[in-house]
Image: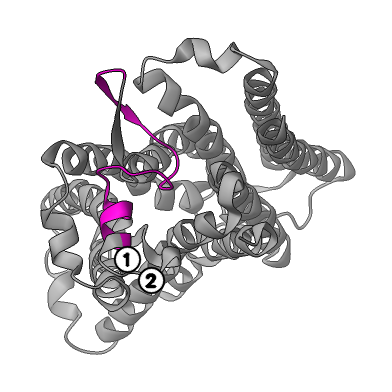
Amino acid sequence: MNETAGMLICAAGGLAGAVFALPFRKIKGVAYESYWLVYALFGLVVFPITLGFVTVPGFTNVIANTPIATLLACAGFGALWGIGGLTWGLMIRYLGVGLGLAIGCGLCSATGTLIPPIVRGEIGDLVKDTAAIVTLVSVVVSLVGIVFVGMAGKFKESELSEEEKKKAVAEFDFKKGMLVALISGVFSGCINFGLQWGGGIAIENGKEVVLESGLKKLWGMSLLAREAGADELWTGIPVLVVVLLGGFVVQVVYCFSMNAKNKTFGDYAKFVKLPGISAVALSALAGIIWASQFVCQKTGEPAMGSMGYISFAILMGSSVLFSSLLGVILGEWKGTGAKTRKMLALGLFTLAASIAIAVVAKKL
């Protein structure tokens, strides 16, 4: 076990989550819902399934031998994530890469911590001991950091002229962006519960309980993948495939409904010739980069051993840091005053502190 290597792998996933949307900036002449469907097809279906066949012997048998209840739970949480995933692109569209991902990832991280005990009926566990209380404090600190970053965005809106705001982010709209970010961040956190649930279900005291680790003998996809001969690093891939398929179904329904509403089905005919082929390539690239963040999380967890519990927090936290840095590089905060930049810095520091607190909590 190499905890440092595992954390670095998860941090690399955060980098992927921060830059995945960059290819979208080059797409022209195609509606959002059309290129988003291509992104979803490659990122949520083609890439993870291909990776599954390459890394897990008997990949289809692993899926087939998993209990239906586990598959439905994973796909269900994936569908909830799908709702958040749909609005993730809109969040970036209205707030920009830096502000959008900082707020979205912060909310996602907080939700991913709170949803599991709530769904399992273990709300009391949030305050059962010192470690649990410190973990809850980290979530509160994360929300405070989100408020600070949101205030920086509000200051930005009041300081810049419409022309300056549009120059940095073409469709900048703080109110719409914050509403979308709230929906996206909360629902997106469900992906972590789906990923943890799929690790396995064991029987304790006569009832099924969800485990956060695949280290015990249990009826989960991670165990089945391990028994099929998959390397420890890749045992989480079947879980990822099922969760993402659940999200893909939701996104297909949305994209087709928007195609019908906006009369943009004709976009798909454009994809067979230039520059449509370029739009397909860019969308596919964005999808593969996006999916890579969770591949990093599921491959980093085994290397972290008992520290695997905090993989999601590291992933989201590094996404915030990298996306904020990217936002600065892209000039999204150019022209803002000292007050705005100080508030942004305070928000980022607070979010980073929340991750540090979560790490400490797991050691108590």
- Magenta region: which residues? 205-226
Kindly identify the residue that appears in the image at 28 percent across and 70 percent down: 56
Helix, strand or loop under label 2: helix
Q: Are marks 2 and 1 in contact (CB under 8 Å)?
A: yes
Colour scheme of the rendered structure: one colour
Quarter-of-image position of residue 322: bottom right
Helix, strand or loop under label 1: helix
Kindly identify the residue that appears in the image at 23 percent across and 52 percent down: 242
Which residue is disc 1 drawn over? 43
The amino acid on which the numbered mark 2 sits, given as a three-letter code, is Ile
What distance separates the C-alpha of mark 2 from that of mark 1?
5 Å
Q: Nearer the viewer, residue 251 or 24?
A: 251
Q: Nearer the viewer, residue 263 or 137?
A: 137
Quarter-of-image position of residue 204: top left
Dot label at residue 288: 2
Quarter occupied by the C terminus: top right
Q: Left or right: 343 with respect to 42?
A: right
